[in-house]
Amino acid sequence: MSNRMLNWRILLAVFIAATLALAPAIAEARAGSSAGGRSSSMGSRGSRTFENNGAQPLSRSVTPLPQPSRPPGFAPAAPAPAFGGGSFFQRHPFLTGLAGGVIGSWLFGHSGWAAGGEGASSASMFGMLLQLLIIGLLIYFAVRLFRRRFASRGPGGGGWPPRSAGAAAAPLAGRDINLSDADLQAFQTIHAAVQEAWSTGDLARLRPLMTPEMLSYFSEELTRNTSQGVRNIVSNVELLKGELAESWEEGDLQYATAYLKWRAIDYLVRDGRSPGDPDWLVSGDPRHPVEAEEMWTFVRRRGGDWLLSAIQQV
């Protein structure tokens, strides 16, 4: 009965996981928002891509994760075997040899004891019990060592640190620069233009506003909406607050990250339907605006036009 119940639970868990994985996801509204349960923070911020700036970390980026640096003069350590650096017997050769000797003598010494006649039967029994006791102690200490090593790899133990641990303590990369009011106005113009082009699904209008990486993400989301037969409408965009969070340069590239709080009418409708149809509205409210807080990063070559290079949710 218990086996049947266990098999039933396993089958149910597999069915639920498959259902969640294969079910078609409806994209959330707003340019740069999440779709299908994925994080909406995407893009690249140069050498500061994975640094903590108070917003959601970038989970979709072509920038590779930074490798932890080693102190000078230290050779790279040899790769350790997975999960605890090898088996217990590889890490404790003395106990391995002792256990092997005890087991070997137990297996092959019985014939010698038996050959001694009845006088050796009591000694044989005592020796066998003593060996069983030693084997039991070896197993007990092996289990304790294994548990202790496993526990040390948990929270607060000696395992690998989080990826963000080194980045949070490291100084900001790049040289800070100052921007003008014209740059801030350019950021606001790009923000409004991106929302308008997103609402109409116009990739040609999005192309001159963002980097090729960001254009690929927007194209992916628009393609998903089209395949699901929906369209995201964003209108009446109003910037409530805009602040420059940081600006820096790396070689001939200049970066700037701005905090943007804005309000807009934001809803999702089904293609091929009219406002009077009962299934026209998929999500959102075409009458009441919603607010959003995001960090937008822009990049340009010195003296060139700004392009959107990353969006992070706050």
Image (spheres, grey):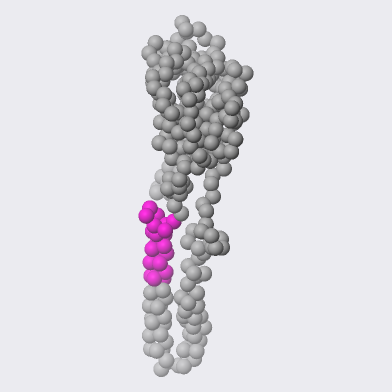
Left or right of residue 284, residue 43 in this image: right
Most prominent secondary structure in the magenta stretch?
A: helix
Q: Is residue 67 above or below residue 280?
A: below
Left or right of residue 287, residue 40 in this image: right
**Residue closer to the observer: 93 or 300:** 300
Query: Which residue appears at 48% of the width and 25% of the height?
Result: 180
Q: Is residue 247 magenta?
A: no
Q: Which residues are magenta?
A: 139-159
Q: Is residue 128 above or below residue 55?
A: below
The image quadrant where one finds the C terminus is top left
Place of residue 275 in the rendered image (x, y in percent of width and height, measured from the top left)? 47, 7
Q: Is residue 87 above or below residue 229?
A: below
Q: Is residue 256 visible to us here?
A: yes
**Residue closer to the observer: 231 or 236:** 236
**Residue closer to the observer: 196 or 181:** 181
Q: Is residue 11 visible to us here?
A: no
Query: Which residue appears at 42% of the width and 16% of the height?
Result: 238
Count of picture labels: 0
Q: Which quadrant of the view contains residue 143?
A: bottom left
Q: Residue furthest top?
A: 276
Query: Which residue appears at 50% of the width and 74% of the height?
Result: 93
Place of residue 284 in the rendered image (x, y in percent of width and height, measured from the top left)? 42, 17
Q: Is residue 148 magenta?
A: yes
Place of residue 70 in the rendered image (x, y in percent of width and height, measured from the top left)? 52, 57
Query: Which residue appears at 37% of the width and 55% of the height?
Result: 156
**Residue closer to the observer: 116 or 303:** 303
